[in-house]
Image (cartoon, rainbow, N blue to C red):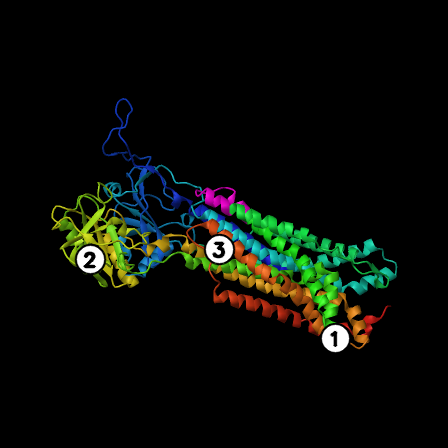
Amino acid sequence: MAIGVCLVLLLWSAANGLAQRDARGAWLREMGQASATVPLAADGRTVNGPLEPIPLTPERILLGFPVDVFRDHSISRRDIAALPTTTVKLPGIDAPPAPGQYYASPALQRLIESTPAEELGDRYGKFVGIIDDSAVPGPDALVVITGVTEAQLRQGPAAMLVTEFTTNPYGESASLYRTALLVGGIAVLFPVLLLVSIATGLGAAQRRERFATLRLIGASPRLVSGMAAVETAVPSLAGALLGVILAGALRPAAAQIPVNGLRMFLADFTFEAGFAVIVVVLVVVASALVAAARTARSGIGPLGVTRAMHEKTPTAWRAVPLLAGLACMATGTVLTRIDSDGNPWTSPLLIGGFALTSVGIVTIGPWLTRIVSTIGLCRARSASTVIAASRIRRTPVAVFRSVSGLVIAVFMVSVFAGGISAIGTVETHQARPGLLLPTSVYATLAPGYTPGQVSAVARSAKERAGIRDATIGYARTALGRGDTMDIYIAAADAPSLGFEEPQAGKIVAFDASFLNSWTTTPVPLTAAPVDNLEGLVPVVMVVSTDGTPEAIDRARTSLNTSGATGMPATSRADTATMSNTRLIQGLAALAYIGVLVAVVIAGISLAVSTAAAILDRKRVLGLMRLMGMPVSVLRKVIVQEAAVPLLAVLLVSVGLGFFVAWLMITSFGGGRTITWPSTEYCAALSLSLLLALAAVTATFGLIRPNTAIAATRFE
């Protein structure tokens, strides 16, 4: 009970923490409005010509959100241009920074202070203050607000006008990780609920003889059921209260677990006292009701259990919840294919379908178990096999209940393993001729800079440690405009960009798609239609490094602080940092934790249920020993009763787990798919089976003392 309540409260705390974290970082998702408009004629028609900039006023500021990366960390950078009299309130700071100044989150400022300035700090200017925690998603968040001039922002392509910052906490990837975390919560909570149910059954089995004595002296069945409920409620209350204490003690450690690369503030990772009371009450009431119902159904008379419990034969109808769950998940996946912008039904279908599938595995288990036991009974060649198969066939629901926790654990492990395997399926571009080297950093150049000015920037970059070369690319017009997208470079510079040595010509050309991080097909190098670079416009600079993280960050800082770049420096390696790959990696870390929790709880459940089965049948097992059956044979019976239902559903659980993972990963998109499981999955599966064996063998000590001659007496 303590384990179950503790996990429920920690999961609830995590949900609260994520909601608070999203609310803190909502303002970072503000995209603003266009900072320029198309001029109109007097009659309202559009006039061909340059866009007309909307001027700054005290009621609005100019916001830029350039891509900024340090090592493999994404930095949430916001460039601000505002009038001194602005009334726009920026979250976390008192007033917008002046040009050349910056505010930083605590984590980023610590990083800046511990890193050479030429690698990071020089990008932002003079430090003037810390961003308050109320505007920072988490203690690890890297956030910076920099002051720039209006002219600097307007020469870039992404400046937006902002009058106020959004409070909507839902970003582009919120649906993805919320769905994954809810599924993970169900995956952890489901084995916990099975454990609570099985533990309640153990208590009922231990009290059979005492209840029979009470019946002998005149207690009614209703009174005995009420006593069973009270006896279960009291220790359940103690366990639930202990769970609350454990959850409070484990909060600081649980808050350190990163989700999407960020930890949570401890103040956010909390549960309300009212919710804890509700959980405790529900657990105690549910345990008491289960104990009362099981005692009433067990038919305890004055001489003990006077009649055998007959179960209703399970049929194929038990497959309906499983099929319904898979249908829901498949429908959600199809909707993501039809509506790529996001369908509101996708997440509920995936979450609901996953819950139904988990329930369906438990409901279909007894039917599969009975089929396997029937086959085993026909092929039985030993006394232990006959006894085990006969009991399984007669009570498949009760027998499967004992291993249901481990079956669910194997299913969850398979789902997690399938999700984790998708991390490596995002295509990684290998260095080869015709593709920009992953060790190179490039930036498009702002219009208006002369070749001489750009050459000075290139010379300054090459003076930094770890930077091998700085290549300037030219075009007939500014990049992305005009009729041509060809970029011209000197033939001698081609090898530094990863091209093979050209055969002839002093000037060579390549398509501008060479610079795109998503380009996967090598771009050919062609002869240029010009003999020299005079009269052409410098449009891009590519800085080649020795590949060390320090050199790449120096190159990035050099370009970003040169003043000549129209867009921030970037590299092909930034694609993985800025994409959902890091999110999936963060969820993978949580998946490993979920696997461990599910497997451990399943092992405990199996040990408890096996012990309950021994106590429940101690008189029958005692009579077998009285007739001369060795204890070793009884141990074989116990092992087979656990092994048959487990093996009957094991392969189904593995297959369903990977199928469910494939449906979810396909729904998340991003070009990911399921691959062969890693060695960690095989280790987790082996751990599950070893834990099952250990759980069953741990109960062997109950057989001899509970099947002695005294167990066969009727008093």
* Camera-side mark, 2 or 3: 2
Mark 3 and mark 1 lie on one chain; the one further toward the N terminus is 3
Q: Measure how far apart labels 2 and 3 are at the Cα level.
A: 53 Å
* Camera-side mark, 3 or 1: 1
Task: Classify residue 3 by image quadrant.
Answer: bottom right
The kind of residue on which mark 2 rests is Ala
Taking the image as shown, residue 319 lies to the left or right of residue 51, namely right
Q: Quadrant of the N terminus?
A: bottom right
Taking the image as shown, residue 179 lies to the left or right of residue 637, namely left
Q: Quadrant of the C terminus?
A: bottom right
From the image, tell me which residue sits under label 1: 704
Q: Measure how far apart labels 3 and 1 are at the Cα level.
A: 50 Å
In magenta segment, residue 390 = no
Q: Is residue 221 visible?
A: yes
Task: Tell me where residue 576 appears, x and y as whole percent.
Answer: 37, 55
Q: Secondary structure at mark 1?
A: helix
The kind of residue on which mark 1 rests is Arg
Magenta range is: 333-350
Q: Is residue 683 above or below residue 158?
A: below
Q: Callout 1: 10 Å neighbours few (<14), some, many (20+)?
A: some
CB atoms of marks 3 and 1 within 8 Å: no
* Camera-side mark, 1 or 2: 2
In magenta segment, residue 345 = yes
Task: Tell me where residue 361 appears, x and y as whole percent.
Answer: 62, 56
From the image, tell me which residue sits under label 2: 494
Q: Secondary structure at mark 3?
A: loop
Pick whichever, 523 or 255, lies toward us: 523
Mark 1 and mark 2 lie on one chain; the one further toward the N terminus is 2
Taking the spot 25% from the left edge, 51% from the top edge, the residue there is 443
Q: Residue 266 got which mark?
A: 3
Taking the spot 73% from the left edge, 75% from the top edge, the residue there is 633
The kind of residue on which mark 3 rests is Leu
